[in-house]
Amino acid sequence: MDGTVVDTEPYWIAAEHELVAEHGGRWSHEQALDLVGNSLPDSARILQAAGVRLGVEEIVDRLLDAVVDAVQRHVPWQPGALELLAALTEAGVPCALVTMSYRRLASVVAERAGGALQVVVAGDDVAQGKPHPEAYLRAAELLGVRAEQCVAIEDSPPGIASARAAGARVLGVEAMVPVPREPGLSRTTSLTHVGLAEIAGIHAGAVLDLS
């Protein structure tokens, strides 16, 4: 979700910077990028190591409060995201939102997607965060399909690994961090390059480079 459907990574990075600074530390952009795609508890533990003297749950709550507040004021949709979701909905393709963000943030995004996201699996819905496949396996189950029948759109190495481990075909979107060049992995630099034909091709087994 963060970085794929909505451009919320800058919100997360700003919240991380503020939290570390409150505790007298410094937080680099490179450190922030290392958290992209991580589960929130894992990110909280890394922030503890950077000097944040709070418990994991309190760190998660502080980050979520900041990002949810920002998203409620303005949802920063990635270019092409709403158009692709609308096209998939019109074509009768069921869609799920699979994210390591918690449900109180994911629900805000899903509610503003015009009914396109029929299923939400959030980070606090699963025991194992990405790169474990649990979230994608659960989403497929809730959609009533096998993960092997799904095309996942991801923007981070942990997310890509999670979807591939579940058996889904994957389109990697290069947003905040580089998308690895891996056999069988489709790639793009923007969802503006992706439509029904491209999703259908990936679903059928094509490996596309849309960058």
Image (spheres, rainbow, N blue to C red):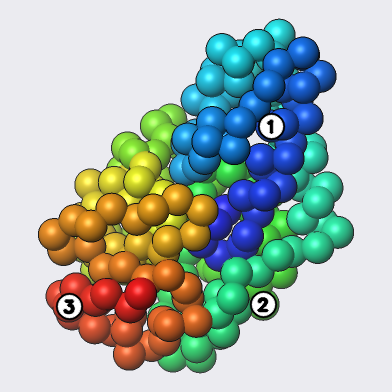
Mark 3 falls on what kind of element? loop
Whole-percent x, y for residue 50 in the image: 60, 15
List the single residue furthest toward the right. 73
Task: Characterize the local packing of mark 3: few (<14), some (14-19) or many (20 or more) Cα atoms within 10 angstroms.
Answer: some
Whether residue 166 is visible: no
Whole-percent x, y for residue 46 in the image: 54, 20
What amino acid is at disc 3?
Ala
The image shows residue 135, relative to residue 191, as above or below, that is above
What amino acid is at disc 1?
Glu
Residue annotated with mark 1: 16
Q: What distance separates the C-alpha of mark 3 from that of mark 1?
A: 38 Å
Residue annotated with mark 3: 206
Residue annotated with mark 2: 114
Q: Residue at x 61, y 41 (%)?
A: 102
Q: Is residue 24 left or right of residue 118?
A: right
Mark 2 falls on what kind of element? loop
Q: Is residue 75 left or right of residue 28?
A: right
Q: Is residue 184 left or right of residue 209?
A: left
In which quadrant is the N terminus drawn? Answer: bottom right
Whether residue 88 is visible: yes
